[in-house]
Image (cartoon, rainbow, N blue to C red):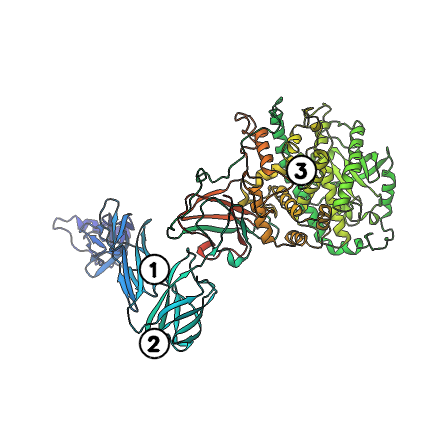
Amino acid sequence: MKRFVVLAVLAAACRADGPTESSPVKSIAVTVNATQIVVGGTTQANAVLFDAQGLPVLDRPPTWTSPTPAVLGVNSSGVVTGLQAGVGIVRASAGAVAGEAQIVVRNPQAGSITLSRDSATIFIPDGAVQLIPTVKDLQGNIITNPTIFWQSTAPLIATVNATGLVTGVAVGTTTVRASIDGRTASTTITVLAAPNPGAPLILAINPLPLRPGGTYSVVGNNFGATAASNAVVVDGVAVTVNLATANGLSITLPTAGFTCDPSRTVFVQITANGQIGGGSATLQVPNLRTLSPGQSVVISSQSDVRCNELPVTGGRYVLGVYNAYRTAVVPGNAGSAAVTVRGAVGAPTTGALVAAPGTSGTSGTLARAPARDAWRGAALRAGGLDLEAAAALRRARARETAHLGLLERNLEFLRARAASLAPRFSRAPLAGRPAPAPTAAAAAVAVAAQIATVGAITPLKIPNVDVTTYCSSNFQIGVRTVFVGQHSIIVEDTVSVFNGRTTLQGQMNATFTQLGLEFENVMWPILVNNFGNPLVLDSLLSRTGKVVMVFSPRVNTFQEGRVLGFTVTCDFTPVSQSPSSNVGEYFYATVPTSAVAGYGDPESRESWLRLMRATVIHEVKHVTAFGERLARSFPVEDLSWEEGMARNVEELYARTFYGTQARQNTSYAASVGCDLRFPFTTPPECTDRPLLMLRHFDGLEQYFPNPESLSPLGRTFASDASFYASAWAIQRWATDHSATSESQFLRDWTVSATTGVQNLEARTGRTWEELLGEWTLAMFLDDVPAFTPENPRLGMPSWNMRDVFQGLCNDLGPCANPNTPSQLYPRASPFSAHPLQFGAFSTTRTIVGGSFSLFELTGTQTGRQVIELRGPGGGDPAGTVRLAIVRVQ
């Protein structure tokens, strides 16, 4: 049927007497090729006419019109032209039937915008002025009906509407801006009170300057006789009238509402008896920070952080914007805060100081000590050993990542079982407690009796730390006792092999004995004198009276070979609860796998021992901390602080080689430099050194270039281990400045009932907000040439940080030899402070919890410099954001 109708329509259209209407039009569908065009642009409109059966009507054209002729024009062929910006309609008609389509007409991109006047004065009440914009496109053609964004910088003084009408609100000055497509024009608006002899008049205000939150006496004439009959605003902000007479007022300014601008003259406006009047006064919104070279201020109060001001001094300042977040940082929850640091400057001041010659460069970095070699010209260049040292450090970084994962699971294990373990371990023999009754399982005691005999073969288990269920998954091994000391036992796996190869089993007696003797004579006294007793729970476990060190090729395979040694907290629990438990104080570690002598092979016994010595004391420190806290039913320490304190025990161990002490300002040559020169006989004291403090400063070299995204409170991403070093640095700095007795400070930290930031506060007697601000500046300013801080806490007494970083760059970077193949440390200092110039600036940073962002402020200063901290959207910054300022020059 449809085919017959279509053929009939076509036949009618071809008749010799011309087309005739075959059927009336019932609907029209209109489409356009482009639904958006610019002014002056065109597009094609299309129409299809349909009859009552929904079939196309082909024998007549539509009539085209535009119901919005100001926006769109259309010709008889349906070609549409944009006339001005707006929403237009194009219509196709046939008789009484019509169809429509909508087209959006946009202006072309603006090339410029100007306003009808640069300035204007408005008198209140009821004063207003109309600003007329002229907008041209990139070709210089005027754009009609442009879409403009209007803004008043001080809407409490004058407001502006969407058409550019400015209305006065209160006496003062504002800037009205008109913006379009990134182009801006502005007009300065001055609002005055209309002259009237009966208006209120201010003769004096005391005291001056006016400050937010302050209370002031106002003397004058024509005031209202009661407080309620006077309306007072300062710079457009309403203030409280406390008392009033016809000649005097008492007013209190609010603490909020004022813009953070440099100190300035404002109008104190009084409305009384139907008249507006008042007088001028100085308003100081920012907190003025007057600092001489070497002086600093840590703004630890949240209420004082947002708005601060520096007087006209010139010189060089360092700003530390930091995030005093208080809890542990983990991936996905780093406590981050976005902060905008804004600068503004007041009107030029007569006699303004400028930066001293040579200090106004744009690099934004403090003067550095000249590159030098700390070893009397004998740089580290021997057989490619610099490259091997770099490779060893990269391997060490990978091991730290694997290690932190194990420690994290150990802490989770103890926290999950804290309630069940408390009754068991509350009987540990602490000072003032009676000795407990024997409670160790018979099997554990039997193993202890057997393993304490040199040459004995004893069955043990190694937890399989490649799986999360390592407290129940393990490998059964047999071990031979190699060394028995007063506080330690060293055993060697006699069963396991490494990748199908034999190891040095049976050939390590002398090496294990050397390690055991060093543990007894050096490490054990450091642990018990500074941290606690590693065997505090021994009477409730296997009662060996010794730490058992298990060396096995099994450990070499764990975590893809990235683990040197580890402890597991399930060894503190009975086998019935943790099948992998050996019920005692155990440490598990790798073995060397190469018989090649010397340090050239990373798997040789010499290379292995170099890494293992510090690893032993590090891991037994964890055993000590876990045991001491379990014995007291205290919560275990946060991950980052526990690792930082384990690095502290490594530092105390390192001093026995360096011959140094706390607060000695140890240099590179006396310490870390020897860590790199361990194979050499020159200087002789470096020979056969373990890897010591090199890892601490390697971690800081990773942290300091980008502290905004890394934190001493924990890892911000899965493989982040930088907090090992940054947490150590805070603890070392706090110990240097707060400890009467270093050993007591460290021990109190270890056995504290508090954890994390609260533990640091308890040890120092100071708030985290103060401590983090000072530490932020101290790390950057330690041993900076020609800088002497008035606050002694702006430095690291135990370490010459600049000299250490310079030495690393000399030996494993380009500072001594720009062509060295090793570029592990590419700068003489790892810090990257953001450069700022006095004047107007704005920069936004996102800072993770517990960390900071550094800025260097230099250049020519022409007026008081405001430093404002803002949060997203321009409001107050996050409640954890703080500011520290130091004047360097």
Name the secondary structure under disc 1. strand
Q: Residue furthest bottom?
A: 225
The x, y position of residue 642, in whole percent, is 68, 46
Mark 3, residue position: 559
Label annotation for residue 173 = 1
Q: Nearer the viewer, residue 281 or 755?
A: 281
Nearest to N terminus: mark 3 or mark 2: 2
- Amino acid found under the numbered disc labelled 2: Asn
Q: Nearer the viewer, mark 3 or mark 1?
A: 1
Label annotation for residue 273 = 2
Q: Is residue 469 something that shows in the picture?
A: yes
Above or below, 62 relative to 618: below
The x, y position of residue 478, in whole percent, is 81, 35
Cβ atoms at labels 2 and 1 below 8 Å apart: no
- Work out how far the residue at label 2 is from the one at label 1, CA to CA, in angstroms: 25 Å
Cβ atoms at labels 3 and 1 below 8 Å apart: no
Q: Is residue 701 found left or right of 559 in the rendered image?
A: left
- Amino acid found under the numbered disc labelled 1: Thr
* Category of crowding for the residue at label 1, using alpha-carbon neighbours closer than 10 angstroms: few (below 14), some (14–19), many (at least 20): many
Q: Is residue 603 something that shows in the picture?
A: no
The x, y position of residue 797, in whole percent, is 63, 42
